[in-house]
Image (cartoon, rainbow, N blue to C red):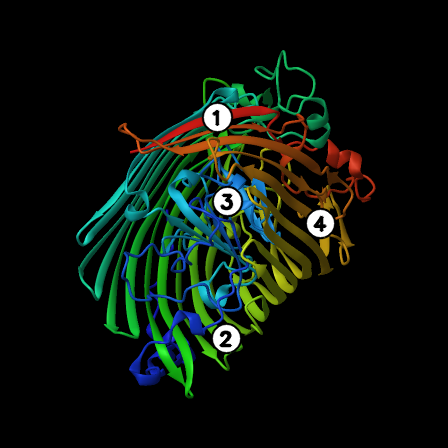
Amino acid sequence: MSVFHLRCPRAAAFPRAAWLLAAAPLALGPGPGGEAHAEGDSVTLEELSVVGEAGPAAPVPARFGVASPQGSAPAVIENPVGQVVTAIDRRNTIANRPATSIGSVLVNSPGVTVRQGNGGRDVIVSIRGNNARSTGVVKNTVVLEDGFVLTQPDGAARFDLTDPRAYSRIDVFRGPQSALFGNYATGGAIAFRTRTGREIGGYEVGTDAGSFGYLSNYFTVGGASGPVEISLFASDVRANGYQEHASYDTQTVNLLASYTPTPDNRFTLKVINNTLQADLAARSSLDQFRINPYQRGCATAASAAPGCTTFNLFANGAFGPTVPVTAAEGAFGRNDRRTIVAARWEHDIDADTTWRTQLGFDERNFDQPFYVTASRGSYPSWNLLSDITRRGELFGLPAIGYAALNVSTIDNHIATYNRAPYGGPRLGALIGDQEAVQSNLGGRARVELALTERWTGVLGISAENTWIAGRNLAYSYAATGATRTVADADRSFLNVAPELALAYRPDAEWAFRGRVATGYTTPAASNLFVTPAGLPGNNTQLRTQENLGLDLGLDWTPTETLRLSLTGFYEFFRNELVSQSPGAGLLSYTFNAPASEHRGVELGVDWAFTPGWTATLAYGFNDQYYTDYVEQLSAGGLTRRFDRAGNRIPGVPANQLLARVGYDVPTGPLAGLGAFVETVVQDDFYLDNANLLRAPGYAIVNANLHYAADLSGGYARRINLYLEVRNLFDARYVASAQPLANTISAATGLQNGPAALATTTGSIFAGAPRNVVGGLRLSF
């Protein structure tokens, strides 16, 4: 079998302008008197900070997702000026509630939509709707943890490995971010910060347990001694699931360690390992969801209850007659492992200049007997980043300069098989064998300039070249024998993303910001080899997705107890990468929509309106529609074209809201006792490009009771207790809905109506019914 491997990127291929930009921070002169430009002299615009555990004071800004040892010099830009950033801290998100998945935490940010993923605590997170149509991985968003990139070089990230208990803070960057984060940041970025050894200062043990067999045992230890600081988190989480055939069992280890041998040299080690074994419930049609939302009574196809989803598998695993099976009979599931090992060296060249170099290895290994096909593969990748930050003066004005060079590569091999019925997750015939190498080489530069005491300007740019080379072998079978077709890819994409921002702070209460930024997302190798029929094949014509975004916003902090942020955005997309499902069990495929527009409003409020009482609001309005897209549909010998201009883009709810009101007893014998009630509301949304069928919206209510107290005279230092009722009123709702492909009649060529879409399986996961989860955490 021939395999195409990618040639090594040549330095000459990298734009000369990018090398010049990389040198820009070195041109910054020292600040007045040779001192570094102080943080307080720049305009730092953090949109919303959920109050931390310790008390009402806002937390000290983290170093851009980097958990550096105390005393570190500013290694990178902290809370970049002009950005739309929500800072989510632990209170009411992690510390005093059972955070079963990262989705329940990230909904605290305006503009974030969360969908149920494929099994376990897997969730699909989108920012401003840019990943709402994804079917299994997080796309269009760069994910970082402690400054290390967790998005693989093909643009994919998953949240299976993300246990919320490990984190002290999460920053959500909204809008195009390629000038700051490079490829795949058209929607934004999410930066996780684990708890450092000093923050933990001992060890903690905890257990959460609840409905549907949910059990989470976790352990955290951390501390510092001299130049060494270590934090280690480990958890074991399992559940039976609220749907039939939806149990899971996952283990996570997360290590952060640092060593500071001298004041100007710091070394950081990051290790994450996650294993997952999960049964997969069947995705149903909208009609089946209405009849049997949790797929109960679906153990066997022969005796299946009304509304059960079945899948037709080839009896011989290759071709010919099919056999209907349920999810349990087909043993659908996932057996995945994710391993990340990364290290960073930080060196202070002088008091104003810091140089960092970090290298990370990241492997995604999977065995996924999904539905009518099964995939097995390994995606090992490397990511090398070297950057420099300098604080000083530019044109006589205080400035911060940042420049980075980044190279990453991923070598993926995936084999796709038909499924065979019965006898466990049996594999049938091989239908696809794909090998590809993807590499990215890029540079980024950014300057923040204090124009006056009230005005700060920002100029940033990135340039990046992406190479994809590979081959996919597709096999089909008939009584006469097997047929093999070959699809080759040898693509190169060059992208440039500028950014311009201006921030104005007239006084301590008000801050205004405007931003024009661009983003780009190149196709991944996996996108190039799935046809619109949902089978392995040739889809190599895909182009880079690009967007230009305009943000206008304000932040108002009239008192220490009230923070309000309002942002309006308008984004223009070209060649938007849109994924949809061609039918039950088939692979989702990707296409380019030539032009579309996204616009909306985001509001965040955090208000302690009287002693002990707090209110939090995160609201997003999102209007997305095609401005240029003609869709071609075929059936039998007929082909028809349909103009989708003006239609809403499927998968994106127009309105979404999180509202929370809570009370914590501030003083007296009951101090530490608290409660809150929250509602999560999401609008309905279209499931198809023709806008014929909608997934219903929902509103669910959660209620929480918690207690925390310091302990004296015993071995434990502190106790945390909490109990939460989720979906208090037992609403039936759609937690995930894959967009569906429109079809035409093979006899008339007319587009099939909403009734045909409503019976198309492979789309809907129901949300959890009413459930109760409680927990205990002890700190020592």
**Rendering coords of residue 490 (x, y %):** 45, 60
Q: Which mark is residue 458?
A: 2
Sequence-wise, the earlier of marks 1 and 4 is 4
Residue nearest the viewer, comparing 116 with 353? 353
Task: Give the residue type that dot 4 points to.
Answer: Ala
Decide: few, some or many residues near mark 1? Use Cα within 10 Å; few <14, some 14-19, many ≥20.
many
- Which one is in front in this view, the residue at disc 4 or the one at disc 3? 4
Label 3 residue SS: loop
* Quadrant of the image occupied by residue 720: top left
- Which one is in front in this view, the residue at disc 1 or the one at disc 2? 1
Residue nearest the viewer, comparing 453 with 21? 453
Q: Are marks 1 and 4 in contact (CB under 8 Å)?
A: no
Q: Are marks 1 and 2 in contact (CB under 8 Å)?
A: no
**Rendering coords of residue 69 (x, y %):** 28, 56
* Residue 5 in sight in this render: no
Q: Judge from the rendering whether residue 168 lies leftward or rightward of residue 221; answer left or right.
A: right
Furthest toward the top, the residue is 303
Residue under the point 61% across and 52% down: 605
* Quadrant of the image occupied by residue 576: bottom right
Q: Is residue 137 above or below residue 647?
A: above
Placement of the C terminus among the 4 image quadrants = top left
Q: Which residue is mark 4?
A: 654
Sequence-wise, the earlier of marks 1 and 2 is 2
Q: How far apart in space, not on screen, are marks 3 and 1 (Cα)?
A: 29 Å
- Which one is in front in this view, the residue at disc 1 or the one at disc 4? 1
Q: Which mark is residue 137?
A: 3
Label 2 residue SS: strand
Sequence-wise, the earlier of marks 2 and 4 is 2
Q: Which residue is mark 1?
A: 774
Sequence-wise, the earlier of marks 2 and 3 is 3
Q: Judge from the rendering whether residue 484 lies leftward or rightward of residue 110; answer left or right.
A: left
